[in-house]
Amino acid sequence: MQVASKTTIINKLTNLLKPMIKVLFPEMRKNKQVQQEISMNMIANILGLGNAATPLGLKAMKTMQKENNEKDTLSNSMLMFIVLNTASIQIIPTTVIAIRNSLGSNHPTSIVFLVWIATICAAITRSCSCYVFN
């Protein structure tokens, strides 16, 4: 992800995610650094790079905590970030494909479409619940 962050592809994906990030994280609209960190984490998750997403997510949470006035309580943006991370929308679920392949599946990639449906439904449901219960 360090190498990828220097490429134009990541910049283009980040620009695609900016409108969604501004809606989901209204408290962070003025903080470009945290927007970049959130988008890098989301891109890593979308690409199925969970191990790369974890340190990026921790970095984003640390930056959001600096903006948080109540240090012992999660801000709305921090809560939304956790919710989206646990939903982890993935286009390429590399870990699941690798596990299925290692266990001898004849079609390890056959679950990709189902993963899309499951993660998108989870993200929408969890995001809506954040707004409802907030």
Image (cartoon, rainbow, N blue to C red):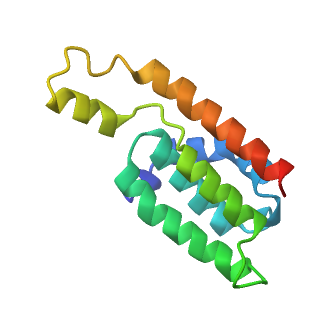
- Would residue 27 be visible to someone looking at this image? yes
82 with respect to 128 (left or right)? left
Q: In which quarter of the view is residue 28 placed? A: bottom right
Query: Quadrant location of the N terminus?
Result: bottom left
Q: In which quarter of the view is residue 62 placed? A: bottom right
Q: Where residue 30 appears, x then y in whole percent?
A: 80, 67
Which residue is at a point 58% across and 42% down the rendered structure image? 12
Query: Quadrant location of the C terminus?
Result: bottom right
Q: In which quarter of the view is residue 69 placed? A: bottom right
Q: Is residue 76 above or below residue 125?
A: below
Which residue is at a point 73% across and 63% down the rendered structure image? 77
Which residue is at a point 20% across and 20% down the rendered structure image? 105
Q: Where residue 120 appears, x then y in whole percent?
A: 61, 32
Q: Is residue 107 above or below residue 22?
A: above
- How many numbered dots are placed on residues in this image? 0
Which residue is at a point 49% across and 40% down the rendered structure image? 46
Q: Where residue 96 appears, x then y in whole percent?
A: 32, 34
Q: Where residue 74 appears, x then y in whole percent?
A: 71, 72
73 with respect to 112 (left or right)? right
- Would residue 1 be visible to someone looking at this image? no
Q: Is residue 13 above or below residue 1?
A: above
128 with respect to 60 (left or right)? right
